[in-house]
Amino acid sequence: MVMQLIRKMGLFLILGLNSFAAIAQEAKWNLPEPVTPVARDIFQIHNQFMLVIFVMFIVVLAIMIYSIFKHRKSRGYQAATFTGPTTRSQIAWTLVPFAILLYIDFILMGIPAVHSIQLMEDTKQGAEMVVKVTGSQWRWQYEYMDGEAEGIKFVSNLTTPQEQIYNQEEKGENYLLEVDNHFVVPVDKKVRILITANDVIHTWWVPAFGSARDAIPGFLRETWIEVEKPGTYRGQCKELCGKGHGFMPIVVDALPEEEFKAWVVAKKGEMEAATAGADKEWTKEELITHGKGVYEKNCAVCHQANGQGMPPAFPPLTGSAIVAGPNFDADGKLMVDSHLDRVWNGKNIMPGWKGTLNDVDIAAVVTYERNALGNSVGDMLQPAQVKALR
Amino acid sequence: MSYASTAGHDEHHDHPTGILRWLTTTNHKDIGTMYLIFSLIMFMVGGLMILAVRVELFQPGMQLMQPDFYNQLIGVHALVMIFAALMPAATGFANWMLPLQLGAPDMALPRLNNWGFWLLPPAAILLTLPFTLALFGIGDGAIATGWTFYAPLSVQGGIGVDFAIFAVHILGISSVMGSINVIVTIFNMRAPGMTLMKMPMFAWGWLITAFLLIATIPVLAGAVTMLLTDRHFGTHFFNAAGGGDPILFQHLFWFFGHPEVYILLLPVWGFMPQILQTFARKPMYGYKAQVYSFWGIGILSVVVWAHHFFTVGMPVPALIYFMFSTMAISVPLAVLFFCWIATMWRGSMTFETPMLFAVGWIILFGIGGLTGLVLADVAADAQYHHTYFVVAHFHYTLFAGGIMGIMAGVYYWLPKMTGHMYNENLGKLHFWLTAISFNLTFIPQFFLGLAGMPRRIPDYALQFADFNAVSTVAALVLGLSQLLFIYNIVSCARGGKKATDRVWEGSDGLEWTLPSPPPYHSFTEQPVIK
């Protein structure tokens, strides 16, 4: 009877392990396929550790189930009276499980864990590129600090339309995991990532990279990635950062060296064109058209697409006294608490945009807010005026 | 002992009746009952909040609510469940059972006891009032930072944060008063002959809990007060621009927050071996080992806090220290599991509802413990942290390990408290529905976490849809099954088969020597322990 039960348990254990190994392969049931050295390390540790705790669980469960079926009053089992180990050999046997546990904790799992911590925290050695990532409510900004890409700087916004989120439209394939400007890195190069935040704490995380690091306002933290396989990888902010927490994804394109170089050239050209735009005279219609796009991407999440806001936290722009007031005083200086001042410097929960939007975007969005959303102030702001503030 | 004289003694008292009786009572049983009822009500309130969240997460897209309201629900759910459901339940048992188990007439400090309880309803109102105020256009709702109050998000937040801070202050004062009462009772009111090492396990669990509360609640109170002054009086404790550090808040919070886990669990670990020995009809295994493990866990629990935020970026030695100290907790915890199972082993077991809950509790809490071991691994934690993997893990420890443990205690002692037997079939049905739907709710969440779904997001990418749908349906079943629990408790309080003094065949301990229900002043004559 006992032997039969033990054999059954063994069979169950083998079946369990097999199915565990099988589901470990399937992405949906496990961590995604790792593409960096750190992620590979974590993946291995995770699979091994899961197997270990699975075995521990099954063994203990088997003992319990055996006892539950065997040591029942309904089967006439007489209760023993022992309250602890008494003989020397009993004491020794009692210590065995704890020896096994100590071995698992500090040797079997402990040693690989220390190695992977050292790997994870080795951000500087052999780093070929440095990128600064800044989290803000609720978007990521990427800034290339050195090498050929130095000076490239852009904001990465969610592009999933509100209509999809509020179920008025069919949801797209990369629903909530799509942005306008992808973060682009070359493959097989160690990229050191410096992380900070503008407002509250965020966490930059791409599951396939295995690296998650908090973005802390006022402090610089770091991590690193070395993507081994070209492709597009998606992640999300994973520290609660306010109402847009679920809506600030991370999309990374890992490109082969040549393609990355081509991207750098193209991106730099794009940025030059944008700067050039600041010097040109814009018509009001051009500014409003451009401003609508900027508004919907950056402002609508709080102030709403129709400008009604969500009072009291997020005031309406429609009919706002600040929007209706002048931006510059008689001497041509930016007035405190004016519309542009609020957009430029921010106040309280409203972020300042001077670091994240370019001159054309700011001029356009201010002009848009003054002449749309039910407002008709009538004037406009030229990008050159914004540029003069810098 | 003569019980007739005890009953006679009761009649000398001139008790107020109606609401005044409950407002002014200093009787440990009355207060214990109020704690337990309060806890049950708040369990339902917190449960309703999270069911609304689960329904929102049933499908991708925003259906029921705005993200801001979603954030308020998840934060208040946690605060309510931890501070207003689990902790008062444990205190309720302490009030009811400690005097009975120690052979005392009442708790040592009855007026403090009354005050400790009556602080709770105002605190619960403070926690939930901002929801109502927002309906009238005052403020923008309850705290929306999650229960952890992380600065600077909480500095930025609205009026709800202030309400939550004051609620935490009041709840903290209540807990500290309860703890003082427990410690004084245990040290001074034990029956003659009951040395500390002969004391029931439940008293040991609560003694360690009480010390942990007194050690850590002031730190939390300090942290949230610093937050309050950052918000309103221009200090910069958590603002880097003023020389502060947002991470300081996390250190302070989790210095309280980690021991809090054990504060919630130790009372359960205390009475669980008593339930096991009752239904195994066999004495508890390894009493001393369990007591020393309690001490070990109590001490370790205050030196491992930083494992809650490995991803903020720490020096390598700190990471390694916090990883290994966290893993070290598995040793005393394994001792406890060993003793619990050894108590069952070669017993003569029957499976009434308390025993079903106890056995289910060992298994499910075991899953919580084992996944906790994996989470201690710093590198792997980078993946698990702040995903649904963590959500599933701590619900295995706090729902299975905490609330299902409390349920075992309720079924175990309900006949003693009310003098009636509850409906056994309904109890068993409640157990099976709870255990099955609990697993179906949270097992998918382990996979969601591994697949990369962050926690606290109001909407999610399409690949997470299937698991979320399963989890939501199961959560609704889990929520509905608790109505059986309430029904069973209420009908048991109102009547039913008369319970004997011993209630259970294998019961052992002083509380079972008194009639069911026990007299108003539990032991008017101290029993003597050999």
Image: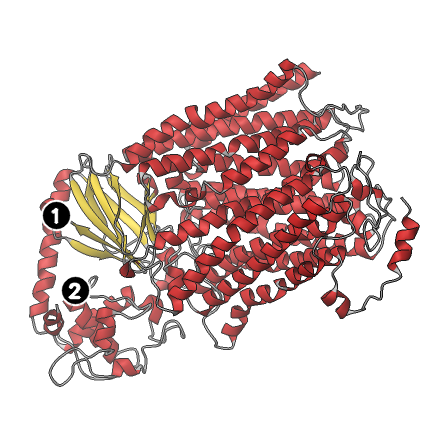
Residue at image position (64%, 48%) is B183
- Image-based side of A129 in relation to A27, left or right: left
Q: Kindly identify which residue carries mark 2.
A: A358
Reply above or below: A353 against B137.
above
Other-residue count near label 1 (Cα within 10 Å), few / some / many at <14 / 14–19 / ≥20: many
Give the distance between the C-alpha atoms of the residues marked 1 and 2, in whole angstroms: 18 Å
Residue B152, image x, y percentages: 36, 59
Q: Secondary structure at mark 2?
A: loop
Asked if residue B137 shows in the view, the reply is: yes
Quarter of the rendering containing residue B316: top left
Reply above or below: A13 against A219.
above
Chain letter of disc 2?
Answer: A
Quadrant in which the N terminus of chain A appears: top right
Q: Secondary structure at mark 1?
A: helix
Residue B374, image x, y percentages: 45, 34
Residue in the foreground of this view, choosing between B178 and A39: B178
Mark 1 or mark 2, which has the lower sequence index? 1
Residue A187, image x, y percentages: 20, 37
Question: Are dots 1 and 2 on a single chain?
Answer: yes
- Image-based side of B415 in relation to A202, left or right: right
Question: How many callouts does the rendering have?
Answer: 2
Q: Going by the picture, which residue comes out furthest to the bottom?
A: A330
Q: Kindly identify which residue carries mark 1.
A: A149
Q: Amino acid at mark 1?
A: Ala
Reply above or below: B109 against A325.
above
Q: Amino acid at mark 2?
A: Asn
Asked if residue B48 shows in the view, the reply is: no
Residue at image position (54%, 27%) is A56
